[in-house]
Amino acid sequence: MSAGKKLPGTPEPMHFWEGFGGLRLAGDSWGGPDGPLVILQHGGGQTRHAWKKTGKALANAGYFVVAFDIRGHGDSEWAVDGSYGEDVLVQDLKSVVAALGNRRPVLVGASKGGATSLIAVGEGHVDATALVLVDVAPHIEENGVTNIDQFMRQKPEGFASLEEVAEAIAKYQPHRKRERNLDSLSKNIRLSPDGMYRWHWDPLYRDRPGKYALEQRRLRLEACSLRLKLPTLLVRGALSNLLNESGAQAFLRLCPHSEYVNVADTAHMVAGDRNDVFGNAVIEFLSREVPTGSQPI
């Protein structure tokens, strides 16, 4: 299943891998396979394309970089049973790691992808060389979760034009300069048979957890954070309404060996807002902790 046809000019995946239960996952890669493996996982509502500039920057620094669309997003298949919880996303990640030869990866995860990475490492599912969490930690703000939820749930009937889509994104990200070229929206939108434009993700993904589930998630992520032994970097967007400074400091107390970068003039989509600053911070961290020439493992 899908939300409709891809718009002209939407890039095709470079790779497909089999995820948990045989579900097909679409991905891209940059750099030569002899470099240290870095796996980039996007957040809910995003696609692998959110990492394109970061992927190229890391590849230029000597790393082998892979980004894939999580299930129900982009060019990856939808889960027929609506299974989009972190446990199944961890299994998908394990499948991609296996498909890449079971090499020890650096895991870089934003939001949902960061929570998946933290669980994968903290519960011993993936043996990673380093972990980079992007605007996510055990304690996140409920109003930030609500803001994301409202954005993803809007206009279930679809948008009548790309201008409407651009307006919705501009309201969600008022700190960003509005895109003048509507063709740039093609990666996020599908054209349905009824002529309406819809987001690329499975609507079932929008079923957000209640307060009890969020509390259980916090406790689980705290336990994972306490177990971290590998090099860890937390990157926060200074304007984020999902992870505030208090939440970031709480993580640093749980994982005192971790490093921390607070990126000015960025919100929740840190890599998209200031890709240059974000990419430089990750490369500087990895050049010390997982230098090129140390892989493949």
Image (cartoon, helix red, strand yellow):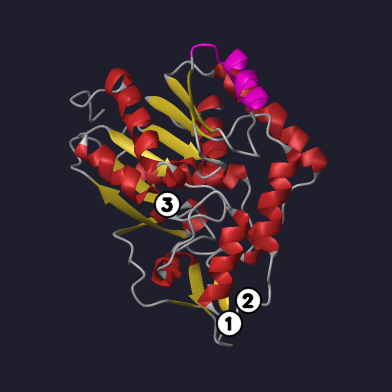
Give 121 or 62, whichever is nearer the viewer. Answer: 62
What range of the chain is rendered magenta?
245-257
Q: Residue at 32% across / 54% down in the picture?
A: 28
- Quarter containing the C terminus: top left
Query: Looking at this view, is 219 or 171 the one in front?
Result: 171
- Residue 190 locus on image (x, y percent): 50, 74
Viewer-side residue, 5 vs 261: 261
| Three-letter code, disc 1 | Met
Examine the rendering and report whether any part of residue 180 can be seen: yes
Secondary structure at numbered mark 1: loop
The residue sitting at 36% across, 70% down in the picture is 10
Q: Disc 3 marks which residue? A: 50
Horizontal arrangement in the rendering, residue 203 relative to residue 8 (left or right): right
Q: Are marks 1 and 2 in contact (CB under 8 Å)?
A: yes
Q: Nearer the viewer, residue 289 or 164?
A: 164
Q: Earlier in the sequence, mark 3 or mark 2?
A: 3
Q: Is residue 256 part of the magenta span, yes or no?
A: yes
Q: Disc 2 residue type?
A: Gly
- The answer to if 21 sits in the magenta stretch is no
| Identity, as a three-letter code, of the amino acid under mark 3 | Ala
**Residue 49 position in % (x across, y down):** 39, 55
Main SS class of the magenta portion in the image: helix
Q: Which structural element holds mark 3?
A: helix
Q: Which residue is mark 1?
A: 196
Asked whether, in this view, residue 102 is left or right of residue 76, the answer is left
User: Compared to 211, does 36 lie above or below?
Assistant: above
